[in-house]
Image: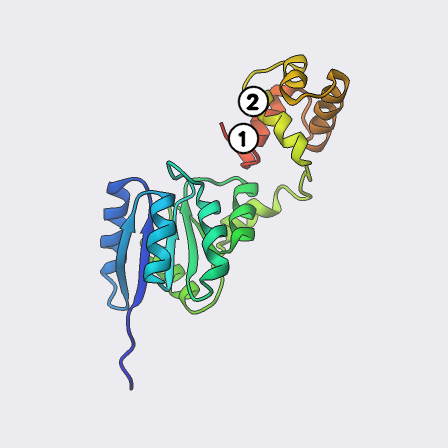
Amino acid sequence: MPFEKPISVVIVDDHPVVRDGLSAMVSAEADIEVVAETGSGKEALSVIPQLAPQVAIVDLLLPDLHGSEVIARLAPALPNTAFLVLTTLAGDEEIRRAIEAGARGYLFKDMARKELVDAIRQVAHGRRYIPAEVGSKLAENLPRPDLTEREVEVLRLLASGLRNKEIAHQLGIAETTTNAHVKSILEKLNASHRTQAVTTALKRGIIHL
């Protein structure tokens, strides 16, 4: 039987303690080898193409680039690298964004060690790894709100505390147009007022503070 090389893994997380823990956890497996660790998205854009690991474990909350952006930039050029998200973000839009960017798996940071190891092996062999709890997050908010880019812009400004008149001025549009956008946002998010719309959007990962 020919000797098989261990699965090469790069860890991308901005918390050194988390990186150390993950590295120790997966390196204990004979068939997995951590070849590099990095704490930022920009470093990941350099390190991952150089090493071309079989698996890249990526947190979404990085200090410079969102993890989904890192995956979107790298995945098309690295078909032999499987991107596995490991994060605290549980919003359905966050999950969709990561998968659409090219992630083959999505895990929450409270997962068990065995699940992480299983996920690494699965995605390294070309399969997807979407646990039931992640799938249920996607299913519970169907259909999707289908907000326009402008409505997302307005939502972000609502979250910053601006009034409709101030939003209109900042976007260079009429206040009546802003009012229409806000009304549409409330309807699409099934919200009865602005604060509820913002809370829902933040929870689902549609916008970030």
Find the residue positioned furthest to the bottom: 1
Whether label 2 touches label 1, CB < 8 Å: yes
Residue at the spot of label 2: 159
Instruction: Tell me which corner region of the image, top left, top right, bottom left or bottom right, holds residue 109.
Output: top left
Q: Which mark is residue 58?
A: none
Residue at the spot of label 1: 202
**In this orientation, which residue lies closer to the viewer: 68 or 132?**
68
What's the residue type where badge 2 is placed? Ala
Q: Secondary structure at mark 2?
A: helix
Q: Secondary structure at mark 1?
A: helix
Label 1 CA crowd tier, 10 Å (few <14, some 14–19, many 20+): some
Q: Is residue 112 visible?
A: no
Q: Is residue 168 visible?
A: yes
How many numbered marks are there?
A: 2
On the picture, is 145 further left or further right than 13? right
Instruction: Tell me which corner region of the image, top left, top right, bottom left or bottom right, holds residue 84.
Output: bottom left
| x 26%, y 59%: residue | 35
User: Where does residue 179 sit, x and y in percent of width and height?
Assistant: 74, 19
Q: Does residue 13 lie above or below 175 as drawn?
A: below
Instruction: Tell me which corner region of the image, top left, top right, bottom left or bottom right, holds residue 61.
Output: top left
Report the quarter where the N terminus lies: bottom left
**In this orientation, which residue lies closer to the viewer: 27 or 16?**
16
Q: Does residue 119 lie above or below 151 as drawn?
A: below
User: Where does residue 99 sit, x and y in percent of width and height?
Assistant: 53, 52
On the picture, is 60 further left or further right than 141? left
| x 43%, y 66%: residue | 80
| x 37%, y 53%: residue | 57
Label 2 CA crowd tier, 10 Å (few <14, some 14–19, many 20+): some
What's the residue type where badge 1 is placed? Leu
User: Where does residue 54 sit, x and y in percent of width and height?
Assistant: 37, 64
